[in-house]
Amino acid sequence: MKSIRVAVAAATVAVALTACSSPMQAGAAAVVGNERISTSKLNADTQAYLAALKRAKLDESALGVPVTQVVLQRLVNVSVSRQLMARHNVQVSETEVDAALKDPGQFESPEINLLANGVPPNDARDYGRVMVGLSKLQQKFGQAGQQRLVEEFSSIKPVFNPRYGTLNPQRSEQNPALFVDTGRFGKLTQQAQPQPQQG
């Protein structure tokens, strides 16, 4: 089986995942600005994503993080992106979406590129639309476009359902999980730190 690592579609992804603590709506996996992402939507998208990985003969364990986290991260980023596009009146044509979906990215095919970004085929157009929209928004912001995009992206703070744990404040290649287990009673679980070797 081939393996893939989850790609970062936009430099703003990590910034978007700074959550605030406000009440969670019942049945929500996350609330992003004015949009609610239901647990049923997350579950359906996760099943569609798993099926797409299987059809492409890709090993889900190679993602490095739980599939639900990959899908939830994508749903949150798409939601934030849509809200920013609406805020700044950014329009994307169907032709632009078509072109974006043909991009193989760093992978051998457009399908693998989408799967590496947590996107099943049924959500490809929505994802392609926001990727084009973010690119247009960055251009619209001009010379400081990347920095301004990061600031705008971080202005919409998602609130996650605590059942997933708490956001991992120090994501890295060694610890890529979006969430860390809080353990019982909300205390963060301490993970053993590797000890430096004596030379």
Image: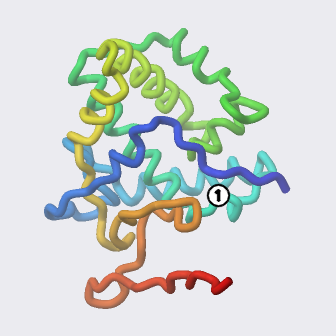
Q: Can you give x and y, in whole percent of width and height, for residue 26 in the image?
A: 23, 64
Question: Looking at this rendering, what residue extends furthest in the right direction?
Answer: 1
Name above or below for residue 127 compared with residue 13: above
Image height of 173 relative to 6, above or below: below
Up the image or down, 52 lies above or below 79; here it is: below
In what quadrant of the picture does the C terminus appear?
bottom right
Q: Residue at x 51, y 54 (%)?
A: 44
Q: Residue furthest front?
A: 199
Q: How many marks?
A: 1
Q: Nearer the viewer, residue 48 or 146?
A: 146
Of 76 and 106, which appears nearest the observer?
A: 106
* Picture residue at 39% right of the left edge, 85% below the top: 189
Secondary structure under tag 1 reads helix
Q: How is the image coloured?
A: rainbow
Q: Within the image, what quadrant is residue 197 found in?
A: bottom right
Q: Horizontal and vertical percent for residue 119?
A: 57, 42
Q: Is residue 28 left or right of residue 181?
A: left
Crowding around mark 1 (Cα neighbors within 10 Å: few <14, some 14 to 19, many 20+) is: some
The structure residue drawn at horizontal position 58% and vertical position 66%, both measured from the top left corner, is 174
Q: Which residue is mark 1?
A: 63
Q: Amino acid at mark 1?
A: Leu
Tell me the quadrant of the picture where the N terminus can be found.
Answer: bottom right
Residue displayed at 32% across by 30% down = 147
Q: Residue furthest left?
A: 22
Residue 148 screen position, x and y as percent: 28, 27
Which quadrant would residue 142 be assigned to in this image?
top left
25 relative position to 69: left or right = left
Left or right of 75 in this view: 56? right
